[in-house]
Structure formats: C-alpha cells, structure tokens
Amino acid sequence: MYAELFTPFENAQNLAGKAWQHAVNIDLIEQSNIKDCSIHCFHYQQMLEMLIKHLLETKSKYGAYSHSHKLHKLLEELIEVTAFKTDKTKYRMALQVITVCAEEYRYNFLIDCEGYKDSVNIANELLNELLLFSTLPC
C-alpha cells in the first residue's frame, strides 16, 4: 500500500526516494509474521520524516530543513515556510507517538502496538495531504 502511494518517487536520488524505500520496507513488514511493531514504527517515522524534509527542500524558498527527527516539529516547520496548510493540532499527538516509538525502537524497548496503530491511522490522513501537496507546483 505505502510503496504504491510513493510510486512517483520510486528510486529517486533524493529524500523522496528514501521515503519510497521506507514505504517498500513497511509493505514487506506488513506481509511478514513479525509481531513486534517497533520496526514498522521505525520505517514509518523515517518515511514521514524523509517526505517532509523533501517538501521543505523543494517547496520552501529556503530549500533547507532542520535536523530535527521530531515529526510534529517538522510539520510545524513545513506549515511555516511553505504553502502547505493543515490543522496541525489534529496530528500533533499522533506524530509525537510515532516519534517516540521510533526512538524506543533504537533502544530496543517494547512499545504499545495498539496505540501506535491508532496513531498511524491518524497520520495516514496527513500522509495523503502531504503527497497531494507534493504534486502541486511550487
């Protein structure tokens, strides 16, 4: 599902191409028998991070992005320096959960898979908004 959404970025030699790679990984994980959702979370967080940073790089007048890995901060930055507009309060908690889950993956902590999945359902709405924004001219 995710790889299909990111098809326009397939094998691109930029951050959007990296987002596509993470989307492919998520699809592979979803087809496996892996019960621990932390690896899914890591790739989901990276997919969103790479997409937002790609949009900051290509759609802002500055052509740059911060070094933050916090998705809610990156979304705020995107809203501030590009034409992208959304209700960031709708996504704030879900993005924070996904960011924390990805951090916990790095340290091999167990995460709340149900809470994470709820956050993904919310973040998928944002993902669709971001992908639509990526198709609009600068």
Image: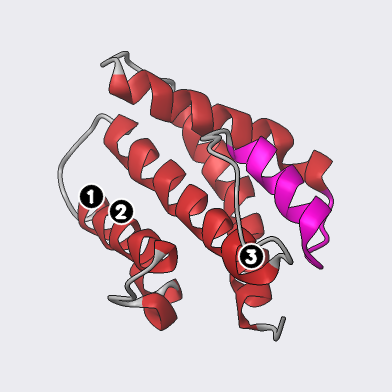
What's under tag 3, amino acid-wise? Leu
User: x and y percent of residue 114 in the render?
Assistant: 47, 30
- How far apart marks 3 and 1 lie (CA) works out to 23 Å
Q: State left or right for residue 9 relative to residue 137.
A: left
To which residue does mark 2 refer?
A: 26
Looking at the image, tell me whether mark 3 or mark 1 is earlier in sequence order. 1
Name the one closer to the observer, 91 or 50.
Answer: 50
**Is disc 1 in contact with disc 2, using a CB cutoff of under 8 Å?**
yes
Q: In this view, does 80 lie above or below 34?
A: below
Per the rendering, the mark at residue 29 is 1
Which residue is outermost to the bottom?
A: 137
What's under tag 2, amino acid-wise? Ile
To which residue does mark 3 refer?
A: 130
What's under tag 1, amino acid-wise? Ile
Q: Is residue 117 above or below residue 114?
A: below
- How far apart marks 2 and 3 lie (CA) works out to 18 Å
Q: In this view, does 26 lie above or below 118?
A: below
User: x and y percent of residue 106 in the render?
Assistant: 30, 23
Highlighted magenta segment, given as a residue range: 71-87
Name the one closer to the observer, 15 or 4.
Answer: 15
Residue at 27% x, 52% y is 30
Eye-nearest disc, 2 or 3 = 3
Q: Is residue 126 above or below residue 100?
A: below
